[in-house]
Amino acid sequence: MRKTRHRDLTDEQAMRYNRHIVLPSVDLDGQEALLNAKVLIVGMGGLGNAAALNLCASGVGTLTLIDFDNVELTNLHRQTLFSEVDVSKSKVHAAQQQLVQMNTDCEIHTVNEAFGVEHKNLVSSCDVVLDCTDNATARDLINKLCYAAGTPLVSGAAIRFEGQLFVAIPGKSRCYGCLRQLFTAPDLSCVESGIFSPVANIVGTYQSLLAMQVLMQFDTIPLNALMTFDALEHEWQRWQLPDTTECDICGPAFAK
């Protein structure tokens, strides 16, 4: 953990998160890890909405939301933090307004900008980054900055009826760049290809689950593996990265 301060759970918070705390894998220590965590979410579309909602409700202490876009009517079927009155508003500010009403213990910071290299200090100050973007250029930059900062990354993507997830922990696993070398899929967006609402919410929710596992350090985290979801077949699959993968980002440590 990167923070200099440590907050203990209050009696009220212990009561609020009791159903977490009674889980042996979480307990008081795990819930306090969430309380003291700083999480960065890049992209406040369908994935970012679902992830932010779950992390805020679950007791993460600080969330920072980055997105340059405004809410559009076509977003509403899958971006469930927003309502009709939010159309034309900044996505990060509209999301912040909803999240602060959900949990006043969660500090919500917003950056109403496109993610760029100038945000590298923000990446290094967080405990985990969630990549909820929808373009390859942003994904590559997020991966590069996370690895340079030693910050764990939980990457998600959703298009049509398909979803994918990848977790990278610098020093413990290969990075997203290793995965990118294996696939040359076109850089599709929801505008051209469409997106089924529950798929975006499933992937974003799963990103929050993986992020909390990273923060609380419990049970098995699927490293060096791409997880895919096919909503039409109701099927999850896991694809292990080959040992022969070489990468300029994470270097020779994982090259064979």
Image (cartoon, helix red, strand yellow):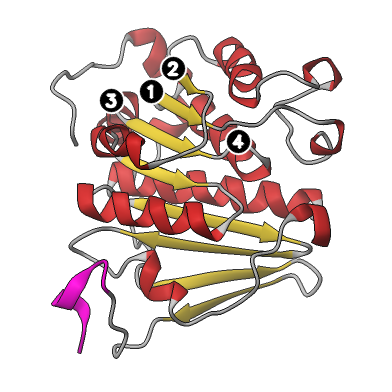
Q: CA distance from mark 4 to mark 3?
A: 22 Å
Q: Position of residue 122 (x, y in %)?
A: 31, 32
Answer left or right for 230 relative to 18.
Answer: right
Q: Are marks 2 and 4 in contact (CB under 8 Å)?
A: no
Helix, strand or loop at label 3? It is loop
Find the magenta span and give its range: 248-256
Question: Was residue 120 drawn as part of the magenta stretch in this picture?
Answer: no
On residue 106, which mark appears?
A: 2
Callout 2 crowding tier (Cα within 10 Å): few <14, some 14–19, many ≥20: many
Of labels 2 and 4, earlier in sequence is 4
Image quadrant where one finds the N terminus:
top left
Amino acid at circle 2: Cys
Along the line of sight, the residue nearer the viewer: 74 or 20? 74
Corner quadrant of residue 193? bottom right
C-alpha separation, residue under disc 4 versus residue under disc 1? 16 Å
Q: Position of residue 72 (x, y in %)?
A: 80, 31
Horizontal and vertical percent position of residue 28:
28, 29
Q: Which of the two discs, 4 and 1, sits closer to the camera? A: 4
**Amino acid residing under circle 1:** Thr
Disc sitting over residue 44 in the figure: 4
The residue that mark 3 highlights is 36
Q: Earlier in the sequence, mark 4 or mark 3?
A: 3
Q: CA distance from mark 3 to mark 2?
A: 10 Å
Q: Is residue 250 magenta?
A: yes
Q: Earlier in the sequence, mark 3 or mark 1?
A: 3
Location of residue 177 with respect to 17 vertically, above or below: below
In this rendered view, identify the residue nearer to me: 254 or 111.
Answer: 111
Name the residue rendered at 26%, 55% in the picture.
147
Evaluate if marks 2 and 1 touch, with contact meaning CB atoms under 8 Å apart.
yes
